[in-house]
Image: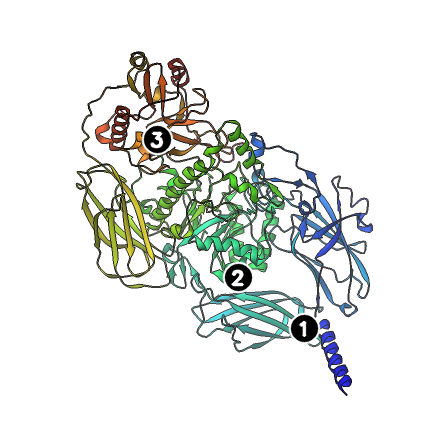
Amino acid sequence: MRNCKLFIVLAVITLLSASCQQTVYEISLAGEWEVMLDSLDQGIDAKWYNRTFANHITLPGTLCDAGYGIPCTLEPTMEKEIFLNLKAKYEYIGPAWYRKEVTIPPDWEGKTILLTLERVIWNSHVWINGKRVNGYNESLSTPHYFQLSNHLVAGEKNSIVIRIDNRKQHDISVRNLAHAYTNDTQTIWNGVLGRISLTAKDEIFIEELRLTPDVDHGKVNVVVSTSAPVSGEIVLDVKDPEGKSLPDMKVPIEGNKLVFDYPVDEPMLWDEFNPHIYHVVTTLRADELTDSKREVFGMRKLTNKDALLQINDRRLFLRGTLECAIFPLKGYPPTDKAGWAKVFGAAHDYGLNHIRFHSWCPPKAAFEVADEMGFYLQVELPLWVLNVGEDQATVDFLYDEADRIMKEYGNHPSFCFWSLGNELQGDFEVMDKLLVSIKKRDERHLYMTTTFTFENEHGSWSEPNDDFWVTQWTKNGWVRGQGIFDDQPTRFNRDYCDAIEGLTVPIITHEIGQYSVFPNLKEIDKYTGNLMPLNFKAVADDLEKKGMSHLADDYLKASGKLAVILYKEEIERALKTPGLSGFQLLDLHDFPGQGTALVGVIDAFWESKGLINPEEFRHFCSPIVPLARFEKAIYTNNEVFHARFEVANFSDGVLEDVQPLWSLSRSDGTVVAQGELNRQHISLGNGLILGNISVPLSSVHEADQLLLSVRLKDIAYHNSWNIWVYPETIPEPKSDVVYTRDFEEARKALEQGRKVLLNPAREEIKGLEGKFVQVFWSPVHFPNQPGTMGILCDPAHPALAHFPTEMHSNWQWWDICKNATTMELDSLKNNLQPIVRMVDNFYKNRNLGLLFEAKVGEGKLLVCSSDLANNLYSRPVARQLYYSLVAYMQSEQFVPTEEIPFERIVASLRDASQQKTVRKSIYDS
C-alpha cells in the first residue's frame, strides 16, 4: 500500500513537471558556441554559414574574454600611445562568426520564435540551417531581435549561425569618441552580452506595451501594440509597490493597437526618496492565442515649470555625474543588476541622485537598478559628431535607434531625460527635426537637442525645442568654476544667477570639474581582467628610474585633496544659485581614456582612492546642504569676518523647527566665536537664508587657518570651510639675511659666506607658468598646458613654521602659485628635495618646485620663485611666507646640505622662456 501511494505521488509530480515544462517557452543559448574570426571578410562568399568551426567560446562573452584576436604586445613606455587608454589583451575589429546547434521542442511547431541577443557591437546577421534570416540588426543601444519562425524545425536539431561585425557602420562619432563605440572606455568588443535566448510565442503576440503615468488624473495611459491585427481581449494585472494586486482590467481589442487608461487611485509616487514601482502583466487572449508581457512604471510627474525641474510638483535638483561606459575590468558593460548596483550604490553613497550616460544608452539592468534606487537618468543617442546631417544613412540610423530605445526602456521611471548626443555640431535643423519627432512619439521624458555645443551661434543659449539645457556657459558668462577659479581669487559669495538670467528652460551645468589627479599606482593590481593598465605601469617605471617612487602616494594625496577642494566649491556654487536645476560632474570616478583623464575622487572601479570618504563628501553634496557666503578666503586680523548662512533643501519636505548652530575656531580647536541662529522652518529650494554673522578677527594674533562650521541641530547635516587670518603688520626682523632679486648680487653675497634669499622676478625664471588649478582633463589629451597639479610640502618643515598650511594646496596658495614661475629642478641635482614642490603631471614626472635650499660654497641659499617683493601691503599671504622664510634662515635649523655650484643654478633658472597655457579644443588632433 505504501509503495502504491509513493507511485501515485511520483506520478503526480511527473505530470506537474511535464505541465510546467510545457509552459516554458524560452531556451537559453548561453554556454559553449563555435567561433571563427573572419578578418578577410570572406565568410559570406565562402558560405561559412554551412560549416562548423573548430574553435570555441562561451557566450555571453567577448572574443577578448576567450583570448581571440590580436594580442597586445605594447610595453609600458612613456609614449603617447600607451596613455591614450587602457589596453585590451586582445583586440579584433571585423566580422566574427558564432555557431551553435540547438534542439527545438516539438510543441514549438507553428510558434513564432524570436532570437534575442541582448547587446552587440555593431551589426548582426543570422542563418538558420544554412538559410539567411531576412534583415539584420545594428542597434548599439538595445537587444538585437530576429524572428526565426520560418527557419527553425521543431523537434529537430537546428544550426544557428550569427555573424557579428564590429566595424564602424555609421558616422556617429568624431575620432570614435562616442562611448557607444570607442576604445577609450568600454573597448570595441565583439561578442554577445547578457541574454541570449530563443522564445516561442503564438502567431500573434504583444510587440510593445507603453505606459505613460498621469499623476494629476490618477491614471496610467496604456498602449498595447500587437504583431498583427487580432480580435480578442487585453487583460491588465497590476501590482502596487507593496506587492498588492490592484483590480485587473479587461479591454476588448480589435486590430493591432489598443489605447486605454488604467485608473491608479491614491498613487504611490516615484522619486529619489520613495522609488515606488508598479509591476504590470499584460495578457493577450484571442481564441487559441495567448501572450503576456511584463513591464514596470512609476507614478511620477516630471516637468520644467517656471524654468525649473520639478518632480511631482516639487523642486528637483540634479546632483549628477557621468557614466561613459567605463568598465576597467572587462571592457564592456554589465548586463546584470549586481554590476549596476555597484555603480549606483557608489554614486548614492557620495550623495548623487543623477547619472548622465554620455553618448550611449546602458542595458536594461541599469534602468532596473536606477528605478529601485530612485536615480534620474539622462540617456543619449550614440552620437558625438561635428557634422550632423551630412550623411543621410546615419540620420536614418538615429531615427531608428531612437525608436528602439523608447520601445525598449521608455517605461522605466528612472528614464527621465533624453539628449540627442554630446557636444553636437552640424545642421541644427536636422537635429531639431529629429528631436521634435521623438518628442511627438514619446512624452514620458524631457528632451534636449545636444548636451552642450561649441557650434557658433548655438552654444550660448538653449535651442527652441529644448525642455532643459546642459551647458558650461551662457551668453552672460560661465556656469562652472573651471573657467574661473584659476583666473582670480575665489569669492565664496558668488553664484551663477547673472549668467542664467532670462533662461526659459531649466539649466544644468555641464561636466563641471575635470581636475586631473595623479595616478594611484596601487590600483595596478586591480586589473585582473581584459584590460591592462600599461599607462599606470609606465608611470611607476618612470618614477622608479628617476628616483621618485617614494613620492607617488603623496602626489596622489596632494593632487587629489586639491581636486576635492575644487569640486566642493564647484558643487556649492551650483547649490547657491536659485535658478539652477543641477550639475553634472566630470567626474565622480576616473575616466581611463582620452589620454588617461584621472579626474575622479574615486577610481574607475567606483572604489575609494583615499581622498575623501562618502560621509565627508555628502557634507556638500546631498539633499540638504548648509552653505555659507563670504567674500574671500584671506583676511588680516584687523578685519571683521562677515558671512551669510544659507541652506539648499532639496529633500522630500519642509524641515520643521530647525536650530542652526555655527562656530569659528582656530587650528588648535580654540573657539574664536560661536552662536545660534534663529530657530526656523526650512522650506524646499535653495537660497534660503539662515542668518548672518560678523566676527572681529582681532583675537587672532598669529597667522592661522580657521574653520568655519555650521550644522543643523538634531539632524545630520553640517558643512565647513577654511579661512586664513594673518597679522595686519609683521615686525621687520633683525636679520643678516640678504634678500635679493638679482642673480649677480646673490653670487657676491654667497661668495662672502652669507645667507641669501634669492627671489628672482618670475619673468626671468625658466620654468612653467604659475597655476593654482591643476591639469585640465589630461596632460596627454591637452599637452599645451603647464601641467602642474598643486603643491606638495611638509607642513612641519621649519621654513613653514609661521606659514600655516597642509601638505597640499588650499585656497591660501592661490596668490603664491599664480605669482610664481614653477622651477624645473632636474638639471640642478639628482633627487633634489625642494621644500615646496609642485606636483608634476604623470606624463612628464619632472622634479618641480617653488622653494629649495642649497649650500653654495661657504654661503647658504634659499630660492623662492614666487613673487615676495611686490604689493606686499595687499598680499598678506606672500608677506607671511616671506616672514616665515626669513625667520627660518635666521634660525639654527637653516643648514642646507645639498651642495650646488651657483653657475649651475644660474644656468638652470635664469631664462625668460616659460611654458604658457594654450587652450585648445578637444577636437584638435
**Mark 2: amino acid:** His
Q: Position of residue 867 (x, y in %)?
A: 30, 25
Front position in the image: 341 or 895: 895
Classify mark 2: residues with Cα within 10 Å, few (<14), some (14-19) or many (20+).
many
In the structure shown, which secondary structural element does the residue marked by tag 1 occupy?
A: strand
Identify the coloring.
Answer: rainbow
**Mark 1: amino acid:** Thr
Res 761 seen here: yes
Read off the residue under disc 1.
290
For the image shown, how many numbered marks are present on the structure? 3
**Mark 3: amino acid:** Cys
Q: Is residue 776 above or below residue 428?
A: above
Which residue lies at the image location 25% right of the left edge and 55% below the top edge?
661
Read off the residue under disc 3.
817
Q: Earlier in the sequence, mark 2 or mark 1?
A: 1
Q: Is residue 400 above or below residue 235?
A: above
In the structure shown, which secondary structural element does the residue marked by tag 2 occupy?
A: loop
Residue 858, quarter of picture: top left
